[in-house]
């Protein structure tokens, strides 16, 4: 049935109307909210409520606007406060959504109203799941799923309905253990591939859900599918549509640095006239770009107070500070800060500190490859590189950096050879890093 709906969707473009009937004001509300211009979104939304206080659509728009506010407000908190702030804001939204459901669940609804109420049920399902209230999550999720499936069975081109159905299909397929079993018993089994295809339909055709679907595809590919590369075009769409969204630009910069695409990060930082890029992102960029003093100036401020950053990020940035001092030739400071690192991070830092000559060459090589400008110089380094004096980690580091360079330049055969070497030489260090390629 699901595959028939997908086929019908593409075959019937000339027959059926697509998605919810919305006004230019509705579209602007969502665009302003995604652009983190909440004052503008709220002004239009207030007028919508004034013009039509009984409209279910306005509650849908309000909830979606508030979800985006939660993202922004949580981003702005230090790590130690993030959970409390997010939980508090989510709880208020859950209370609001429950009242909307109570008011409208027994009313006779139009197709559009079914879409809005079904989506609100879906929101409640996700929030109950976050809180660990699984029976409530499944009950709300199933109610929303049933309403939206009813819509697309009658009108396969109602593209916005595919957002929630995509979420349910994808996550239900990934659920494991007792939770997954209970979900299946309650009729919330899913199909990962169908889920992704539904999200792509919502991203491509949805009037209200295109950016939501793009954001979810970014999350799925970069965090759950371990496929950062496939996420990049969706990042680019989101930033083009919503250039003031600080969450997207910082997330995008982090993914680009994982892929050693420093040239793109350079442009984003250079053009950041609104100062949206966060200090920790800039600190990482400056460290990778060879501006070690700039990087450590930011890091020393960030690391003054524990609990500002996520613990795994804090450990990474402490390690980066040590490497920065190492590259600056300040061995005293490097050793001083190395002492405070967890054992696992000490081990990786020592791979560099114990082979200083080779390590410094390779760090500069990664920098050169990341900017992707002097290709002749990069390829000459690769051709003439000598492993003498390197430990296995640094040998693998050279091969991995070479592989990423070749991959980013469309030379996939050469890239594959170097990825395989990196994984064989130091599996622990590079097996996971090579997976997205």
Image (cartoon, helix red, strand yellow):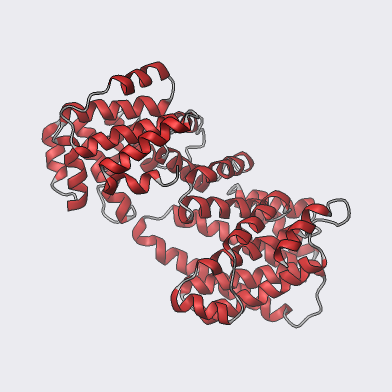
Q: Position of residue 210 (x, y in %)?
A: 67, 52
Q: Nearer the viewer, residue 209 or 410?
A: 410
As rendered, which of 367 and 271 lies closer to the eye? 367
Task: Say which quadrant the N terminus sits in.
Answer: bottom right
Query: Quarter of the image containing the C terminus?
Result: top left
What residue sits 80% from the left and 75% below the top? 109
> Residue 382, how many percent across, how many down?
33, 23
On the picture, is 267 further left or further right than 314?
Answer: right
Q: Is residue 437 visible?
A: yes
Residue at the right extreme, as displayed: 15
Whether residue 277 is visible here, answered yes or no, is no
Q: Quadrant of residue 6?
A: bottom right
Residue 123 placement (x, y as % from top left)? 60, 68
For the residue pair 239 and 407, the one nearer the viewer reads as 407
Residue 224 falls left or right of residue 419 = right
Q: Quadrant of residue 393?
A: top left
- In the depicted structure, whether residue 158 falls above or below residue 283: below
Write the residue at 47% across / 69% down.
88
Question: Is 101 situated above or below 167?
Answer: below
State the image quarter where residue 50 is shown: bottom right
Say if 127 sits above or below 160 in the image: below
In the image, taking residue 402 as reference, residue 197 lies left or right, namely right
Q: Residue at x 55, y 69 (%)?
A: 172
Q: Total number of numbered labels?
A: 0
In percent of width and height, residue 367 lies at: 34, 28
């Amino acid at each position: 049935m699901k595959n028939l709906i997908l086929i019908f969707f593409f075959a019937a473009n000339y027959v059926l109307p697509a998605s919810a009937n919305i006004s230019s004001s509705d579209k602007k509300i969502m665009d302003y909210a995604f652009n983190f211009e909440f004052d503008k979104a709220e002004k239009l939304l207030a007028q919508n409520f004034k013009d039509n206080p009984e409209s279910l659509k306005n509650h849908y728009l309000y909830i979606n606007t508030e979800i985006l506010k939660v993202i922004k407000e949580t981003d702005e908190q230090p790590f130690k406060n993030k959970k409390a702030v997010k939980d508090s804001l989510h709880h208020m939204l859950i209370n609001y959504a429950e009242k909307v459901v109570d008011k409208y669940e027994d009313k006779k609804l139009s197709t559009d109203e079914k879409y809005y109420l079904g989506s609100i049920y879906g929101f409640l399902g996700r929030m109950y799941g976050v809180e660990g209230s699984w029976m409530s999550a499944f009950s709300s999720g199933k109610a929303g799923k049933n309403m939206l499936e009813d819509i697309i069975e009658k009108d396969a081109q109602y593209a916005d309905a595919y957002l929630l159905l995509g979420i349910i299909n994808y996550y239900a397929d990934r659920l494991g253990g007792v939770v997954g079993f209970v979900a299946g018993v309650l009729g919330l089994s899913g199909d990962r591939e169908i889920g992704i295809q539904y999200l792509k339909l919502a991203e491509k055709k949805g009037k209200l859900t295109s950016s939501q679907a793009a954001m979810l595809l970014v999350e799925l590919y970069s965090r759950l599918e371990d496929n950062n590369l496939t996420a990049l075009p969706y990042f680019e769409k989101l930033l083009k549509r919503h250039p003031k969204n600080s969450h997207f630009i910082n997330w995008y910069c982090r993914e680009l640095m994982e892929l050693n695409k420093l040239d793109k990060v350079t442009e984003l930082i250079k053009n950041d006239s609104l100062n949206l890029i966060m200090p920790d992102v800039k600190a990482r960029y400056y460290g990778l770009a060879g501006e070690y003093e700039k990087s450590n100036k930011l890091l020393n401020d960030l690391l003054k107070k524990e609990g500002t950053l996520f613990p795994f990020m804090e450990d990474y940035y402490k390690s980066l500070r040590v490497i920065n001092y190492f590259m600056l030739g300040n061995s005293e400071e490097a050793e001083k800060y190395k002492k405070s690192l967890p054992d696992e991070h000490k081990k990786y830092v020592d791979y560099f500190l114990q082979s200083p000559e080779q390590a410094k060459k390779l760090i500069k090589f990664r920098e050169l490859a990341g900017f992707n400008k002097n290709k002749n110089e990069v390829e000459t380094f690769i051709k003439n590189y000598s492993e003498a004096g390197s430990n296995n980690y640094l040998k693998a580091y050279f091969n991995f950096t070479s592989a990423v360079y070749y991959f980013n330049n469309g030379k996939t055969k050469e890239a594959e050879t170097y990825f395989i070497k990196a994984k064989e030489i130091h599996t622990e260090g590079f097996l996971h890093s090579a997976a997205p390629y």
